[in-house]
Image (cartoon, rainbow, N blue to C red):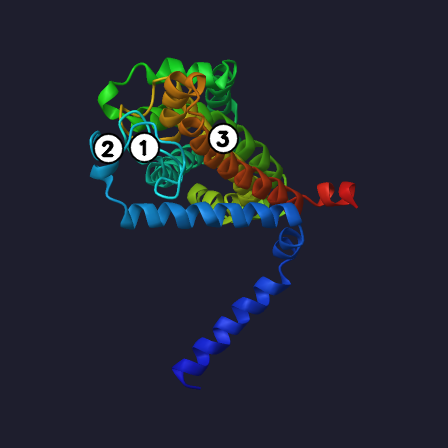
Amino acid sequence: MSAETASRTESRGILDRLRASPFLSDLLSNRLALVGIILISLMVIIAIYARLFLDVEALLRTQLGENPTLAAPSAEFPFGTDRQARDIFPRVLYGAWLAMLYGTITVGLSTVLGIGLGTLAAYYGDVTDNVIMRTMDILLAFPSLLLALAIVSIFPDELGLWRAVLALTLVYIPRFARVIRGAALTVLEDEFVDATIALGARDTRVLFRHLFPNTLAPITVQSTLNFGLAIIDIAALSFLGFGATAGTPSWGLMLSNGVRFGLLTGQWWWSLFPGLFLAVTVLGFNLLGDGMRDALDPRMREAID
């Protein structure tokens, strides 16, 4: 058998397994989840386009004298202009890149750290479990945004959106730790784990070969739902002045400037379009997360049926 034929056979086998997957079948049969996938894909395409083809320096600097100030939406300026005569349309598009970039970093960091802490707490139990989970409980006792504001104020303003990323990462870790701990405790009750330990398997093998792969489902759902939450929380911190620095084309900062300087004076477009893009993005992740949860949880499927 030639290498090309073997490659085709392997690709066909992967496609057949994907088609036979109950998870994908249930997910793709969920119309709301499909809407979420479409919305997210659209925002990802916009974000990549903005990163590759838009001039960041031109978006940051003032364009007074080049463009009209506070111009209403028109054929030349589809989303209008702001007080600095900057075209809002490309700034909103670039805001999609910033939202996806910093949202991914926030969710990625909090997921990895939460998985590590939750898995250790479940596997070792006793003192380790008490120390880790009581710390998580203390963090969960505070309202999320209030805790994020307290943490973000520690970091210097020069960090910009990275302040929001660091603060929200610390805020989200307890959520992932609790989810992964609960899932890990369920897996640890299975006989195959006891058999693996009895055969002398090392802790690292039990954790990475048996425990972690069997807890991916709830973590995947939690990460997807938290992605939308991270994007809106980053925007909220920027809106309150604790995220993006002045001039940054962040949706939250554009919303803040639009409400402060434009909304009450009739320049509705300044805040409408960033808010619309933010809402659509968060809606996409929420719809996809709900669809994944329904597809991965048999009890949820039974309840729906």
Residue 208 picture location, percent across and down: 45, 46
Name the residue tied to disc 1. Answer: 249
Q: Disc 3 or 2, which lies upstream in sequence?
A: 2
Query: Mark 1 packing: few (<14 Cα in 10 Å), some, or many (20+)?
Result: many
Which badge, 1 or 3, comes first in the chain's sequence?
3
Q: Position of residue 8 (x, y in %)?
A: 47, 77
**Which amino acid, mark 1?**
Pro
At which x and y percent is residue 252? 40, 26
Mark 3: give few (<14), some (14-19) or many (20+) Cα within 10 Å: many
According to the picture, the residue beneath numbered tag 3 turns out to be 229
Where does label 2 land, which residue? 60
Q: Quadrant of residue 255?
A: top left
- Residue 268 appearing in the image: yes
Circle 2 Cα neighbour tier, 10 Å, few/some/many (<14 / 14–19 / ≥20): some
Q: Is residue 171 left or right of residue 195?
A: left
Q: Please name the residue shown 33% across and 28% down the image.
A: 82
Q: Is residue 41 above or below residue 233?
A: below
Mark 3 to mark 2: distance in Å?
26 Å
The residue closer to the viewer here, 200 or 263, is 263
Amino acid at the residue labelled 3: Leu
